[in-house]
Amino acid sequence: MKVYPAVDILGGRCVQLVQGKRESATDFGDPLACATRWLEEGATALHVINLDGAFGKAQANAALIRELVDETGVEVQLGGGIRSIADATAWLETGVDRIIIGTLATEHPEVLGTLAGEYGSARIMAGVDARDGQIAVEGWQQTRGNFCTWATRFEELGAGSLLYTNVDVEGLQQGIMIEPVRELISSVSIPVVVAGGVSSPADLQGLHRAGAAGAVLGSALYSGKITLGEALRAIL
């Protein structure tokens, strides 16, 4: 299982939000400096979210993210505000390893097949953001049906992996909910990376045992509730 430190970018700064609310942002400084710190502490991959994109500015932070990809040279998965094939193509051509398609995958699922056909399924990750067992879209404000049903459909259409975010616990630093993770992993045959609530070595060990391919560390890592070293040791 791989650990992905989060580098969430808003207004050119590395921030962490609570429950996806812009007004909750805590500023942690330069995104490249944050990314470099995590790599120096042992990370081999990064989870980058263009929050300005999620809030409606699709190509915001493009130059900064391109620099981060070029300077770090490590595996990067990128999400945030990818609302069209043009958006997806632009980000893929920056050199990120994979893009995360969220609301777009629910509204126009056929784009997964189109992008997978052009770039390979390994570079297309479908976002499964779930609240109360329902897939959540439009900034987590609306739900559109059972999250496992959608995940299965995303796999059938060409997604090479899934990012599962449990909205109910995201950013709260209170631990994960393992049962939905197990349910999702048992529903599909492609890799599942888990985000939302990962706050302790026990959380990581539980995800590892459940068969998760990766875990995203965000708020708990930045607050110091868990160190990257502790996270990496937990999955040895």
Image (cartoon, rainbow, N blue to C red):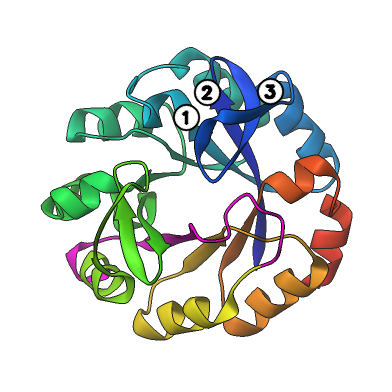
Q: In this view, does 47 lie to the left or right of 33?
A: left
Q: Measuring from the top left, give residue 199's x and y in whole percent.
A: 74, 60
Q: Which residue is drawn at 38% across and 56% down?
A: 122
**Amino acid, disc 1:** Asn
Whether the residues at callouts 1 and 2 have beta carbons within 8 Å, the answer is: yes
For the residue marked with disc 3, what is the amino acid? Leu
Decide: few, some or many residues near mark 2? Use Cα within 10 Å; few <14, some 14-19, many ≥20. Answer: many
Residue type (three-letter) at the residue carrying disc 2: Ile
Q: Tell me if residue 4 comes above or below residue 202 in the rendering.
A: above
- State which tag comes first along the sequence, 2 or 3: 3
Q: Position of residue 211 (x, y in %)?
A: 57, 80
Is label 3 in a helix, a strand or a loop?
helix
| Location of residue 205 with respect to 79 vertically, above or below | below
| Alpha carbon separation for disc pair 1 and 2 | 8 Å
Numbered disc total? 3
Mark 3 — residue?
A: 32
* Residue 220 higher or lower than 194, as above or below: above
Q: Can residue 197 be seen in this view?
A: yes
- Residue annotated with mark 2: 65
Residue at 35% across, 62% down: 160
Drawn side of residue 211 relative to residue 61, left or right? right
Residue at 74 percent of width and 25 percent of height: 28
Mark 1: secondary structure = strand
Quarter of the image that includes the N terminus? bottom right
Q: Mark 1 points at which residue?
A: 50
Give the label, 1 or 2, closer to the camera. 1
| Mark 3 surroundings within 10 Å by alpha-carbon count, few (fewer than 14), some (14 through 19), many (20 or more) | some
Secondary element type, mark 2: helix
Quarter assignment of residue 235: bottom right
From the viewer's perspective, tell me whether residue 184 is left or right of residue 35. Answer: left
Q: Position of residue 34 (x, y in %)?
A: 74, 29
